[in-house]
Image (cartoon, rainbow, N blue to C red):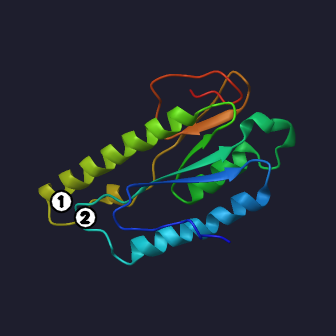
Amino acid sequence: MLGSLFSVDSAIDAYLLVYDITSETSLENLEYFDELIEKNLDAGGRGRDVAAPVKIVAGNKCDLSDHRTISSAQGLAWAKAHGCGFMETSAKAMVNIEETFQILIRQVVEHRQAALAGSSSSNSPTNATRQGPSSTSKTGLTGRTTTLTEKPAKQRSGCCVIS
């Protein structure tokens, strides 16, 4: 049942939308969750000095590349179309797990600072509070493209290289 453990609250700072790279249905289901997030934002539950939540899409199970049905490019395209950052991860192999959360936290802090700076410098909301994160792409040593919203503090070897 979709959404049974999903919560949208105006006080939430970030969402990590995870799909399984071996299941097309899991990527399709992200649409439902993204719509829930956007409906809450459109309902006006956040004040002018509160940043819009950060959203990152994680394509999980990159250790199962032989069973992949969703390419990195497809995951990236979905993330960009919905204003989200993008990572490929493997919880089993611990690939890009820490880095994903580090980026998420860093962006929450940046969004909060931008929202506070915008509300104190003018009476209108800042554009930065509703914009999705910017993304960059780079092909790693494995030949796979990993897209990040910013450069992480360190790199990790494995099936998905952060660069």
Could you tell whether 121 is left or right of 51 in the image?
left
Q: Could you give the CA–CA distance between mark 1 and mark 2, rounded to whole angstroms? A: 6 Å
To which residue does mark 2 refer? 125
Quick one: SS at disc 1?
Answer: helix
**Marks 1 & 2, CB-CB < 8 Å contact:** yes
* Three-letter code for the amino acid on which mark 1 is drawn: Ser
Image-quadrant location for residue 102: top left
Which comes sooner in the sequence, label 1 or label 2?
1
The residue at the point 51 percent across, 33 percent down is: 99
Q: Residue tagged by mark 1?
A: 119
- Please report the residue visible at 36 percent of the width from the left and 47 percent of the height from the top: 108
In the picture, the quarter occupied by the C terminus is top right
Residue 59 spot, x, y in % from top left = 66, 46
Looking at the picture, which amino acid does disc 2 mark? Pro
Nearest the eye: 7 or 132:
7
Return the x and y of residue 81 as percentages of the image width and height: 58, 59
Q: Is residue 143 left or right of residue 161?
A: right
The crowd level at tag 1 (other Cα within 10 Å; few <14, some 14-19, many 20+) is some
Residue lying at 65% horizontally and 70% vertically, measured from the top left: 2
* Secondary structure category for the residue under label 2: loop
